[in-house]
Amino acid sequence: MTKFFLTKDLYMLIVMHHKAGNKQIESVTKAIEAMGLTAAPIPGSERTAIGVLGNKGYVDDTTIRDLPGVSQVIHVSKPYKLVSRDFHPKNTIVKVGGVEIGEGKRPVVVAGPCAVESESQIIKTAIAVKKAGADMLRGGAFKPRTGPHTFQGLREEGLKLLVKAREETGLPIVTEVMSPDTVSLVAASADLLQIGARNMQNFDLLREVGKIRKPVLLKRGMSATLEEFLAAAEYILAEGNPHVILCERGIRTFETATRNTLDLSIVPLIREISHLPVMVDPSHATGKRSLVSPMSKAALVSGAHGVLVEVHPEPEKALSDGPQSLTFAGFEQLMTELKRLNGYLGF
Ligand code: PEP
Ligand code: MN
């Protein structure tokens, strides 16, 4: 019996109703076997549980959940494997241009406007954030806006301007890709491809960025659980691209005083479960300029490998996300504070 459990993984535990009879137990056992898996009934004094064993990976429970006599289905194995430390104990360090992101590295700062709006706006910002010590430049060319009547981004023109900003400053560029058919276009310019919160479960897009070798910044969906977040990253790794950085950017809760609720506890939790680097975006998490600096510092204290911060030359005139964008002076101040904090953290 012990040997049996050692050679096969326990995927699921099916708890039968206390009134379930042998016939029902037998039909569940047959359904498990029909899936190519092994059923191991564990009779108890009040009810029977059935262990589901095999060597396949995550098991879809839809054909079993509704069978007569089944009271509860408990998943033991997770819908992800490649992103997990159990499978890959060594920390992943993602390289973007010359910048290394991950465990043991100095936390990185990615800064720039929500959207690329004009040549002068992105070049000015690139020069200012570089001078203040940013490691990378961000800026959306393809923007996922909530409604269709707002600024949608400069698209290809925006990518060209980002490339100019990189030429000007040497900063690697981070920009969002919204659809599978634009992955190669965006990847031709970007150093780090961002998948936005709204697209975290766009599985075709995840597969497409999994097929290329450019690093990916995967943002957490606004209603995604940790398991869903890691399962989304699993899609990218499963296609062969291991260069993934996870990014907590706030989740939807009952609280409306902030744009989202920054779920900082997920940072050390991700570091326990996964080998992938994890960053925090305090701009979208809070939606409020005054909260960006305190939450950036909190992010680094919680163990984040970097922060993603929106900065704009004139936030009051920004075409998107002005209220959460730092001014150049505000960003310089933040960088001074982060440098001091890094000293304390040993970087
Ligand atoms: C952004 O980074 O500008 C953005 C749209 O972020 P998110 O997908 O997290 O909302
Ligand atoms: Mn934004």
Image (tube, grey):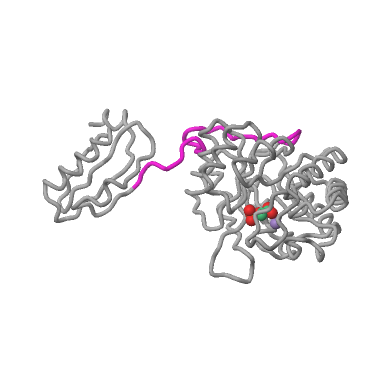
Residue farthest along the left direction in this orientation: 22
How far across and how far down the image is residue 114, in percent? 74, 55
Residue range corresponding to the magenta coloring:
75-99
Quick one: 116 or 132, which is closer to the camera? 116
Residue shown at 48% from the left, 49% from the top: 228
Q: In what quadrant of the picture does the C terminus appear?
A: top right
Residue 12 position in % (x across, y down)? 31, 43
Q: Position of residue 169 (x, y in %)?
A: 86, 41
- 81 versus 24 height, above or below: above
- Can residue 346 be seen here? The reply is no
Residue 89 lies in the magenta-colored region: yes
Q: From this viewpoint, is residue 123 visible?
A: yes
- Ligand 2 shown in quarter: bottom right
Residue closest to the eye, 268 or 54: 54
Residue appearing at x 76%, y 63% in the figure: 322
Q: Write down the quadrant of residue 257 in the picture.
A: bottom right
Name the residue rendered at 26%, 46% in the picture: 64
